[in-house]
Image (cartoon, rainbow, N blue to C red):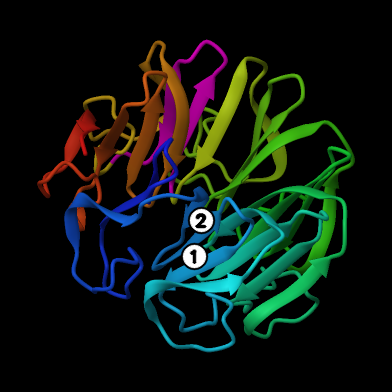
Amino acid sequence: MILKTNGSLWAVGRNDFGELGDGTSVDKVNPVEILSSGVSQVSAGVYHSLILKNDGSLWATGDNWYGQLGDGTSVDKVNPVEILSSGVSQVSAGAYHSLILKNDGSLWATGKNGSGQLGDGTQIDKTSLVEILSSGVSQISAGAHHSLILKSDGSLWATGSNFNGQLGDGTYESQNVPVEILSSGVSQISAGDHHSLIIKNDGSLWGAGFNAAGQLGVGTTEERYILVEILSSGVSQISAGSYHSLISKTDGSLWATGRNFYGQLGDGTYLDSYSPVEILSSGVSQVSAGDSHSLFIKNDGSSWATGSNLNGKLGNGVSLIELTPVEVEF
């Protein structure tokens, strides 16, 4: 999903379940316009997408097998349907669950819950949004089977699968309600498939969880069940993908670590990296790591992509793997 500065929403790639929201189930190798205006935020899961409009309304499209769209059914949608008419401030789509943050700081969730990723105290899937926390939440991030929650006091909370230590609480015990991981000092969170990344107020980068491909960036493939420091300062933005991670520094440089089988790191090779490698030295304003591909935006507003191009997900009109970033034009 691609959001332009004019509020228009565009989409490209796999569309088996209508996750692009263009009224079809046909893959697209070039970006197609879904909504012409009024969109403020988007989040793409595995086969579903969440859309937040300027008026605070929540819309969803795609796979709904587990109720991840939150419309009270388990019926797939090929066009965006309205879930809430107002009051939403942030959205995050996990693999098969969705997290919603409202203006009042309350956290809501829907969809698959077999690992407790919704945080409602059960392991029962939900087809409609349920309230998890009534206030105090400032940021959310949904992973494959776990969820990260940042509160307004800077504390970090987590719920769901902890099979690989991705909650960072020093155990491998999964949780079905949010548990506090850090009491203060956190400024940004990102949940990957089986690992987690956070930025602290001092610009340091920390991570926990699965690390078989080096996605934590600590120089080894050793799994960590307690948050470990990756970089001591200078980090401004992070995005945890399936088995790789993207890092943007305050100087605008782009760094990447982890699996690179499809060239998703963008360093011109197929070699995994166990420590962050510099991809671009400056000019990057936003990053997003997918399953096996990476997207980023430059300061000039141009959109770039690298990695797997199966189903045309890079949006450059072909289906060829790209080992270095290519510009996506639309």
- Residue 187 in which image quadrant: top right
What predominant SS class does the magenta segment belong to? strand
Residue lying at 46% horizontally and 80% vertically, measured from the top left: 64
Q: Residues within 10 Å of mark 1 (few under 14, many from 20)?
A: many
| Residue 246 within the segment the image draws in magenta | yes
Left or right, residue 36 beside residue 222: left
Disc 1 target residue: 95
x and y, in percent, of residue 85 in the image? 63, 68
Q: Residues within 10 Å of mark 2 (few under 14, many from 20)?
A: many
Amino acid found under the numbered disc labelled 2: Asp
Query: Are discs 1 and 2 less than 8 Å apart at CB?
Result: yes
Report the disc number at residue 234. none
| Residue 244 within the segment the image draws in magenta | yes
Q: Which residues are magenta?
A: 243-260
Observer-nearest residue: 59 or 114? 59
C-alpha span from label 1 to label 2:
8 Å
x and y, in percent, of residue 306 in the image? 26, 36
Residue lying at 58% horizontally and 50% vertically, measured from the top left: 54
Disc 2 target residue: 193
x and y, in percent, of residue 18 in the image? 32, 72
Observer-nearest residue: 170 or 75? 75
x and y, in percent, of residue 211 in the image? 51, 44
As helix, strand or loop, the secondary structure at mark 1 comes to loop
- Is the residue 207 above or below the residue 19 in the image? above
Observer-nearest residue: 282 or 82? 82
Amino acid found under the numbered disc labelled 1: Ala
- Is the residue 116 above or below the residue 165 in the image? below
As helix, strand or loop, the secondary structure at mark 2 comes to loop
Residue lying at 68% horizontally and 70% vertically, measured from the top left: 109
